[in-house]
Amino acid sequence: MTSRRHPRLVAYAALAALGMLGGVALGRPDLIALVAPFAVWLALGGALSSRPRLRVDIGLERSRTAEGEVAALILGLEGGPIPWLELEAPAPAGLEAKTGRIRLCLSEGARETRRLELTCKRWGAYRLGPIGARAQDPFGLFQFSGEVGEGVGIRVYPSWARLRQLVPPARTQVFAGNRIARQSGEGIEFAEVREFLPGDRVRHINWRVTARTGVPHVNLLHLERNSDVILFIDSFTEVGQGRDTVLSLAVRAAAALAEGHLRQRDRVGVVGFGGLVRWLHPAMGPRHLYRVVEALLDTDVVTSYAWRDLEVIPPRVLPPAALVVALSPLLDPRSLGAMADLHHRGFDLLVLEIAPERLVGSELQRVDELALRVWRAQRDARRHRLQRSGVGVVEWHPEVPLEVALAAAREYRRSARPALR
């Protein structure tokens, strides 16, 4: 820690000097006796004061938490003597200090534990520490300040609403799941009735139809399969400030979709398409939800003017016949080209367009009206271009629940089902 003189030292020194000079010049020993304690205090403080010994071990109550929760920073203090010590944890953007500063007195060789609380305002991966410390020597003549301890990492997971209904994929895979496949086989969902053929199981015989027609008939059942779902997040641009931005809404929506599809025993993968391209291979199971959320935490806007295409993504990340849910504000032509490429490759593509107007807020009033109309016209043109090519594009406004947008997507796909087949 660096040291500097306390204002008290300057005041005491000036008072002692003036008293001594005045007493000698005026022949007043009482003035010298009056300022003598200050001079003695300065002499003792200069001779006996030393840099305080302080060791701070920084730990976390939990290394993972969620938006809206409180993260506790545990400080283990050792050292002394420090008659006055102030500690403050720097709160990065996205975290808000709830406890603020703490002040204490640390005696020689003491060991104490203190707790600093931070409110998690926004998802992300953060580095907490080192801790800012300020201290004074026992005589109060010198101040010491600096940073102590080693930083620790904390990961704040996004909060999401549990979705009751999802957008069903157009095609299923060969693995067992909760999706009703179009093919007949072993399942529980009724498909149709047909006449008995050699090789059919007796337990599948429909006795009512057999008794009515006099010819053996069997029930056909739908297979239960799973699907592959790829969450495609456009991270080329960012609109908005604070907790609700285009990227924040996209990450929360992707987490909600991942949790819902994994609950249906689908395989879920992630592609972050932006200045940096990141991906997560599709998998299933409760543990994979944490892998998806961890991958979403690494999604960030990185400025890049390079043209991106899907050739940089390994083929195993985009399995055939997968449902690709793209979350994008449709503000960058590079993401539009990637979505068109996915559609031309035969993927079942659904685009959730995150409307950015409400996120900009009052800043739109300072924008020229003509520029604003051109900006909106470009987004409309990109949306209509995708729709004309047969891609389902559903506009999602931030103030509307995600389930409302998914209901509109299901309605659109129901009317476009012949084209999907």
Image: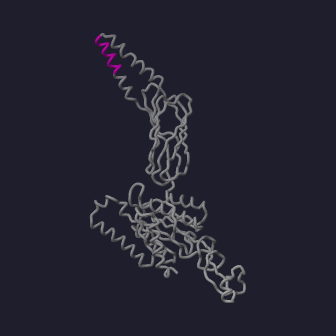
Question: Left or right: where does residue 318 sit relative to residue 389?
Answer: right
Closest to the observer: 27 or 98? 98
Residue furthest out toward the bottom: 214
Instruction: Give the percent coordinates (x, y) of residue 339.
Output: 46, 72
Magenta stretch containing residue 24, yes or no?
Answer: yes
Specify the principal SS of the magenta part. Answer: helix
Q: Is residue 412 magenta?
A: no
Q: Which residues are magenta?
A: 15-26
| Number of disc labels | 0
219 displayed left or right of 115? right
Residue 187, percent across and down? 64, 75
Q: How is the image coloured?
A: one colour
**Is residue 147 positioned above or below 166 on the image?**
above
Q: Position of residue 313 (x, y in %)?
A: 53, 68
Q: Residue furthest left?
A: 369
**In the image, residue 83 above or below residue 88:** above
Answer whether residue 338 is visible to the viewer in this image: no
The residue lying at 43 percent from left, 29 percent from top is: 142
Considering only vertical position in the picture, is 341 above or below 164? Answer: below
Question: Could you tell me if residue 99 is visible in this image?
Answer: yes
Q: Residue at x 43, y 26 (%)?
A: 140
Between 175 and 59, which is closer to the camera in this rendering? 175
Q: Is residue 139 above or below residue 360?
A: above
Percent x, y for residue 123?
48, 55
Residue at figure coordinates x 58%, y 72% from the top left: 179
In which image quadrant can residue 209 be found?
bottom right
